[in-house]
Image (cartoon, rainbow, N blue to C red):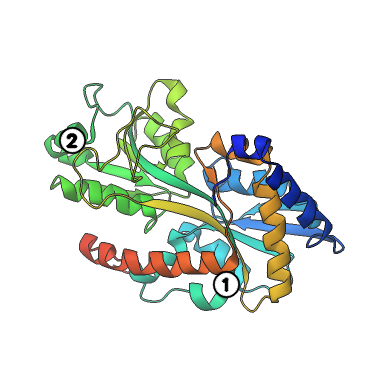
């Protein structure tokens, strides 16, 4: 279910829904403190998702704080929450690739997404994009142009992403494979550190969430060459998708989603789900997420569980085709 500003401002049913949820599911006493844990640095899209939602969780908690547990490509945050009691005081927010791709690239993962976490709700959906910076000549305007440049400059043929094994990592690798170019990958602790290196001329390209890339367009130093969605992103309507540019099997979007530790009480899960539904329906949250290229999206716990299972199955053959293993 996608929320838009127009729907929120014009839909009487949405207003009635929020009133009903507020009076019923959220009528229980607030907890004192809620902590939302994310595995990525402040300033990026994952952090922005958490902070926008945190301001609207008043129906559930008196105070909500965001805790950036960076490291190991988002794994530290998941392990942190996994080890805690499922009492509703700590909520994990993570990109789904940490749950759907990592099981294919690590022989020994410190968590089992289907066992160690309880799905609560999606938070948003977004596309990734490939951006180039000052290291790449201004004449490079398309994905094909970049691949030709990379082939001619093999020592500089690399790209950064927010984490090894993340969706943007594989999108960058797939772009390289499509042109027969071995693009070397550099993993960062989030997209923003990678973008700083891009702006500084230290790396030629970054594959990351569209919203992380568009933040830097005003510098005049960044060009987005392509996006990963099935259709053009509304945040970059002038940028063609990879599919439009002739790259096959490149329609990939990703979710940020919320989870509790395993074995959370169903009533508690439903209560948090209801609070997130209200938060994600707020025009302020929708508009705030849009500035980062994120589309607010709420789901039921069961729907989120289905997304994780479906995406896990989809990424298995892709990981095999790329040939990446985090254990090598």
Left or right side of 128 for 267? right
Q: Position of residue 283 (x, y in %)?
A: 66, 38
Query: Tag 1's secondary structure?
Result: strand
Q: Which sits earlier in the primary sequence, circle 2 or circle 1?
A: 1
Q: Residues within 10 Å of mark 1 (few under 14, many from 20)?
A: many
> Is residue 166 depicted above or below 243 in this figure?
below
Q: What is the spatial separation of the Cα atoms under label 2 and label 1, in whole angstroms?
A: 41 Å
Residue at left offset 36%, top offset 40%: 129
Q: Residue at x 75, y 58 (%)?
A: 34
| Quadrant the C terminus occupies | bottom left
Who is closer to the viewer here, 221 or 8?
8
Residue under numbered circle 2? 144
Reply above or below: 14 against 290. Answer: below
Q: Position of residue 212 (x, y in %)?
A: 47, 38
In the picture provided, is 192 more to the left or to the right than 185? right
* 216 relative to 271 in the view: left or right: left
How far from the left and from the top, in percent, is residue 19? Answer: 79, 50
Element class at badge 2: helix
Q: Residue at x 53, y 64 (%)?
A: 304
- Residue 101 visible in this rendered orientation of the protein: no
Q: Which residue is mark 1?
A: 117
Total numbered badges shown on the rendered structure:
2
Quarter holding residue 260: bottom right
Q: State the residue lying farthest toward the front.
A: 12
Q: Is residue 76 visible?
A: yes
> Where 180 falls versus 8 (above or below)?
below
Residue 42 or residue 98, whichever sits in front? 98
Mark linked to residue 298: none
């Amino acid at each position: 279910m996608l929320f838009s500003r127009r729907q929120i401002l014009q839909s009487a049913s949405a207003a009635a829904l929020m009133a009903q949820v507020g009076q019923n599911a959220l009528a229980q006493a607030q907890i004192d403190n809620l902590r939302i844990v994310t595995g990525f640095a402040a300033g990026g899209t994952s952090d922005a998702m958490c902070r926008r939602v945190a301001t609207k969780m008043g129906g559930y908690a008196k105070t909500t704080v965001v805790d950036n547990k960076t490291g190991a490509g988002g794994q530290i945050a998941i392990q942190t929450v996994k080890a805690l009691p499922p009492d509703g005081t700590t909520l994990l927010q993570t990109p789904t690739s940490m749950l759907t791709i990592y099981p294919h690239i690590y022989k020994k993962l410190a968590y089992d997404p289907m066992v160690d976490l309880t799905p609560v709700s999606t938070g948003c959906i977004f596309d990734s994009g490939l951006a180039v910076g000052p290291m790449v000549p201004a004449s490079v305007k398309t994905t094909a142009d970049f691949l030709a440049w990379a082939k001619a400059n093999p020592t500089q043929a690399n790209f950064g992403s927010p984490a090894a094994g993340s969706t943007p990592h594989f999108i960058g690798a797939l772009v390289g494979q499509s042109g027969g170019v071995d693009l070397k990958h550099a993993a960062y602790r989030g997209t923003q550190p990678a973008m700083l290196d891009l702006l500084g001329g230290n790396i030629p390209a970054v594959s990351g969430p569209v919203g992380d890339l568009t933040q830097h367009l005003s510098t005049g130093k960044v060009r987005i060459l392509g996006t990963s969605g099935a259709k053009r992103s509304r945040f970059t309507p002038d940028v063609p998708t990879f599919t439009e540019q002739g790259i096959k099997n490149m329609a990939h979007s990703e979710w940020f989603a919320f989870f509790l530790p395993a074995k959370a009480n169903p009533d508690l899960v439903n209560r948090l789900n209801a609070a997130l539904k209200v938060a994600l329906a707020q025009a302020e949250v929708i508009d705030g997420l849009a500035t980062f290229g994120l589309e607010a999206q709420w789901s039921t716990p069961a729907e989120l569980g289905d997304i994780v299972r479906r995406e896990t199955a989809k990424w298995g053959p892709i990981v095999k085709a790329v040939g990446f293993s985090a254990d090598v």
